[in-house]
Every structure is written in structure tokens, then in C-alpha cells.
């Protein structure tokens, strides 16, 4: 009598480079890669990815979705916290440098892909990304027997996935405009965003930053300030966004696309808060 051989059920995972998704979907649907100019329904998009995987890997179970993004000092933004609370989703954070460029995300993807493949935790990996640096992650996972399927966002004008990455994977799939449109919403343009008024001086912007800091401190107090200080000279994403929005309202002029003025705004904000600490 032949002994029955137990079969291990297939398992898949989805690895999402959030920086690639924001840039590609934003450009395709809203015409911009700047996250500040559009909203992304991450929960809806993740559900759509899961549904797609369920169709492709019909006889396989989902391990989880890995969502890779960047954050200052690897501290979750409120949006990233909300994503991390979703079922079957794990948020993994790289760092953001002074130019808002992600650092360390590709290495996180490689580590997870290689580890899961090595331990036979997954048989298939759906990778949503386009960076050539991901080639080594694909090779590592394939070396342990996992199949890697590259998913991408339709390019608005030119290719957004590196050729070496396309050559290395086991299959490819591209999500088009109709797929992405429900999950991207262009933020309304403010009345002053296209204004042709002359730019304010750095001194004027710094003064506005200090003024906003005074209001911020009055509303939140020393405990909240103590939480903010270790991050100097950087501000958490939500605080930085609120600072920019309020400054533009007071100045009646957009500061987007003007990095020196953005820095002056933050300098004024920090200068006032540090002065408060000394009193």
C-alpha cells in the first residue's frame, strides 16, 4: 500500500512599493507625481490587488500584503498608520531624506522576499514596482523556488518599469487607467495656487511660520512640543502639511514648487518653538 504524500497548499503574498504606486497612479490619473496634489484610496487599491491575486492564484491562499513606504525617521504618518491597521496588511518603512526620496525600501523588499521564499512560506509573489534595484530581490526569491509576478501601473507617457526587471520575472501584468481611476482623486486647486502675484520674501514666510507655530503651541501645549523636538529639523508629514496649508492661506500664495520658501517656513516655525523651550 502506497503511503499518501501530504501536499502543502500554495501560498502567495503581494509586495507593494508604495512610492512607485503613488507616482505612477498619480501621474496616470491626476497628471502629477506629487502626493500633496491628490488622494490615494490605499484601502480600496489594496482590496483590488487582493481580488486580482485571488483570481490569478485561484488555488492559493493569501499570506499577507506588504506595503513599503518611506517616512521621516521611520515614524508612521497618520495615513500609514491607517494602512497598517488594515487586515492582512503589513506596513514596512524605509527612510525619507531631505529631498523626500525613499531610502532602504528596496532592501526591505529583498529581505522579505528572500526570507519568505527560503522558508517556503510562499510559492508565488506579486511584486508591484518598477525599480531596477528590485532585480536582486527577484533573483533571490526565484533561487529558492518561488515564482515572481511583476505588476505595474500603465505608464502615462513612457515606461515606468526597468527592462532588466521585466526580463527577470516569471510573468507581467499592467493595471490600466480604468483600473486606477477609482482610487485616485485630484485635490481641488486653491484660488491662489495659480495666482501671478510676486513671491513673498523669505523673511515674510519665516514670520508666517513663527506665527503659525505660536498658534500650534497654544493649541497643543508643551507635551506635544516635547514629542516634536527630537525630530528637529524635520516635521512629521501631517504637521508639515498643516503648516504649508495654513501658510498658503495666510499668504494668499502657493509655496508649492518653491523649496527655499518651504525651508524658510519650517525655519520660522522651528525658531519660534525652540524659543518657547528656552523660556
Image (cartoon, grey):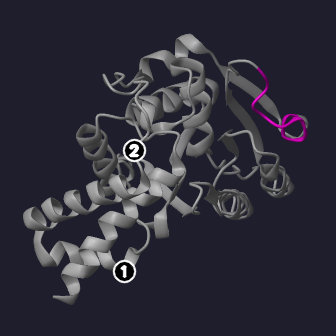
Q: List x then y, in percent, for residue 125.
A: 68, 43
Q: CB atoms at circles 2 and 1 under 8 Å apart?
A: no
Q: List x then y, in percent, for residue 200.
A: 39, 44
Q: Nearer the viewer, residue 89 or 18?
A: 18
* Residue 192 visible to the viewer: yes
76 left or right, relative to 169: left
* Residue 58 visible to the viewer: no
1 left or right, relative to 165: left
Task: Please identify, in this view, whether the residue under mark 2 or under mark 1 is nearer the observer.
Answer: 2
Residue 272 versus residue 205 in the image, above or below: below
Residue 114 versus residue 38 in the image, above or below: below
User: Which residue is identified by label 1?
Assistant: 230
Magenta stretch contains residue 45: no
How crowded pointer 2 is (Cα within 10 Å; few <14, some 14-19, many 20+) is rated as few
User: Which residue is identified by label 2?
Assistant: 200
Q: Quadrant of residue 20?
A: top right
Residue 222 versus residue 77 in the image, above or below: below
Magenta stretch contains residue 162: yes
Magenta residue span = 158-166
Q: List x then y, in percent, for residue 278.
A: 22, 89
Q: Nearer the viewer, residue 171 or 220?
A: 220
Label 1's element?
helix
Amino acid at each position: 500500500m502506497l503511503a499518501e504524500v501530504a501536499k502543502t497548499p500554495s501560498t502567495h503574498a503581494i509586495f507593494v512599493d508604495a512610492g512607485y504606486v503613488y507616482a505612477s497612479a498619480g501621474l496616470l490619473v491626476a497628471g502629477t507625481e506629487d502626493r500633496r496634489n491628490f488622494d490615494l484610496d490605499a484601502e480600496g487599491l489594496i482590496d483590488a490587488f487582493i481580488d486580482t491575486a485571488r483570481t490569478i492564484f485561484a488555488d492559493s491562499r493569501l499570506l499577507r500584503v506588504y506595503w513599503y513606504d518611506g517616512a521621516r525617521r521611520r515614524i508612521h504618518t497618520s495615513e500609514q498608520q491607517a494602512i497598517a491597521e488594515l487586515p492582512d496588511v503589513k506596513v514596512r518603512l524605509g527612510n525619507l531624506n531631505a529631498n523626500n526620496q525613499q531610502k532602504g525600501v528596496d532592501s526591505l523588499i529583498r529581505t522579505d522576499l528572500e526570507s519568505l521564499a527560503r522558508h517556503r512560506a510562499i510559492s508565488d509573489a506579486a511584486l508591484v514596482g518598477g525599480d531596477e534595484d528590485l532585480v536582486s530581490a527577484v533573483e533571490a526569491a526565484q533561487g529558492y523556488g518561488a515564482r515572481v509576478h511583476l505588476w505595474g501601473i500603465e505608464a502615462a507617457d513612457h515606461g515606468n518599469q526597468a527592462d532588466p526587471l521585466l526580463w527577470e520575472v516569471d510573468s507581467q501584468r499592467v493595471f490600466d487607467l480604468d483600473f486606477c481611476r477609482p482610487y485616485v482623486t485630484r485635490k481641488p486647486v486653491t484660488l491662489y495656487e495659480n495666482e501671478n502675484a510676486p513671491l513673498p520674501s523669505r523673511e515674510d514666510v519665516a514670520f508666517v511660520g513663527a506665527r503659525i507655530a505660536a498658534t500650534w503651541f497654544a493649541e497643543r501645549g508643551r507635551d506635544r512640543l516635547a514629542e516634536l523636538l527630537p525630530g528637529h529639523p524635520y516635521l512629521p508629514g501631517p504637521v508639515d502639511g498643516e503648516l504649508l496649508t495654513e501658510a498658503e492661506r495666510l499668504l494668499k500664495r502657493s509655496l508649492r514648487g518653491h523649496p527655499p520658501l518651504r525651508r524658510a517656513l519650517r525655519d520660522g516655525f522651528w525658531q519660534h518653538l525652540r524659543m518657547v523651550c528656552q523660556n
